[in-house]
Amino acid sequence: MNGPLAGIRVLELAGQGPTPLAGMMLADLGANIIRIDRPAGLAWSVPDPADDILGRGRRSIGLNLKDQRGVELFLRMVENADVLIEGYRPGVAERLGIGPTVCLERQPRLVYGRMTGWGQQGPLAAAAGHDINYLALSGALHAIGSAGGPPVPPLNLVADGSGGMMLAFGIACALNAVRASGVGQVIDAAMVDSVAVLMAPFYAHAVSGRWGERGTNLIDSGAPFYAVYPTADGEYVAVGALEPAFYRGLLKGLELEDIDPDQQMDRAGWPALRAAIAARFASRTRAEWTEIFADIDTCVSPVLSPAEAVTHPHYVARNGFLEVAGRPHPAPAPRFGHHPRSDPRPAPAIGADTDAILAELGLSPDEVAATRQDGIAS
């Protein structure tokens, strides 16, 4: 595998949400990742590995970490690793005997990446949670939605997504520090923190009084020139004409040139402006509006379904999606000038590489067979 992380050896304790996202990003950039799965029959997994896009680019070993013999095999793997990723609740790794202290004793240069929802300490550290809960506590969920309506969860993109990316970024930073110091490091990556980082400007706006109720602000659908509108065929277009030049282009494309563009920020006129814009967009199909605005630089885009997005000409021109095992995969990102992109391998089935990985640890064929027979590996 080519990439700026080629040669970096990563152990990923199987999990959900942000942990596999971080692993996918590292694998896409060349890291050699072994996923430690629970033995087949005990593990949670996607029914068809081809659908496990976040799991691409790894090898898999099924290992029973509730058996001390499985723990010892894992620690032998740690001795040759650069990075370990785990997404357990605080204290779980320690109870299994694979916490940071034990692992760093085996490999002093190890980057031990810990991914949680609430962090390693604090009143909620041991509590359960999902993406929506971290959005709720951080204030992000409160800010998303239309005026007069309830908050709207933005899929599980914000907390899981930012958490996984923060973990991957932290690992890259820690690897650089280890290269300079020779000393390993433990990373406490929490989704409640990553969401707060994304929300940084909005906290400032709220304190200064520049942020009003949900759905009434400039970039939360409150402004009629930054909103989504239905078209004649039941589809939608997204409008982001914030700047005066883009706003003028919007009015031109909609043939609303009788509206004074200099009154764009007059909030008293926004209800009438929204009605006028909505009526115009409702008069033609999404395809017609896409064609009209194709040559007007005004931040108007068709709202595509996921299935439509993968075939959009812009993605096609950039090779933005790849077909892997019959599924559309987003291409590895970002792109690097000196590292040609490699197409990712599909996600492995649980334990697909167990025999090979155990052999790399020095186990003989008979010893590998014995670990399977004893339920230590699968």
Image (cartoon, rainbow, N blue to C red):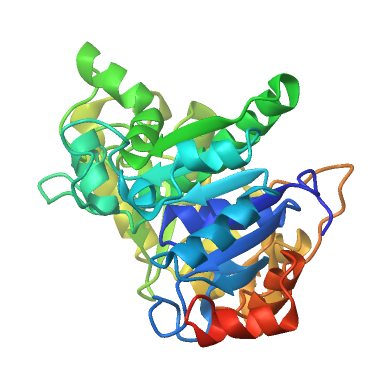
In this view, 61 is above or below 127: below
Q: State the residue at coordinates (70%, 77%).
A: 323
Instruction: Report whether residue 110 is seen.
Output: yes
Residue farthest along the left direction in this orientation: 148
- Along the line of sight, the residue nearer the viewer: 308 or 339: 339
- Residue 291: quadrant of the picture: bottom right
- Residue 185: quadrant of the picture: top right
Q: State the residue at coordinates (52%, 56%).
A: 21
- Along the line of sight, the residue nearer the viewer: 94 or 226: 94
Instruction: Report whether residue 293 is seen.
Output: no
- Residue 45: quadrant of the picture: bottom left
Q: From the top left corner, tell me how far across and down residue 176 is, in percent.
A: 70, 28
In this view, 345 is above or below 108: below
Q: From the top left corner, tell me how far across and down residue 62 is, in percent.
A: 53, 74
- Number of numbered discs: 0
Residue farthest along the top direction in this orientation: 208
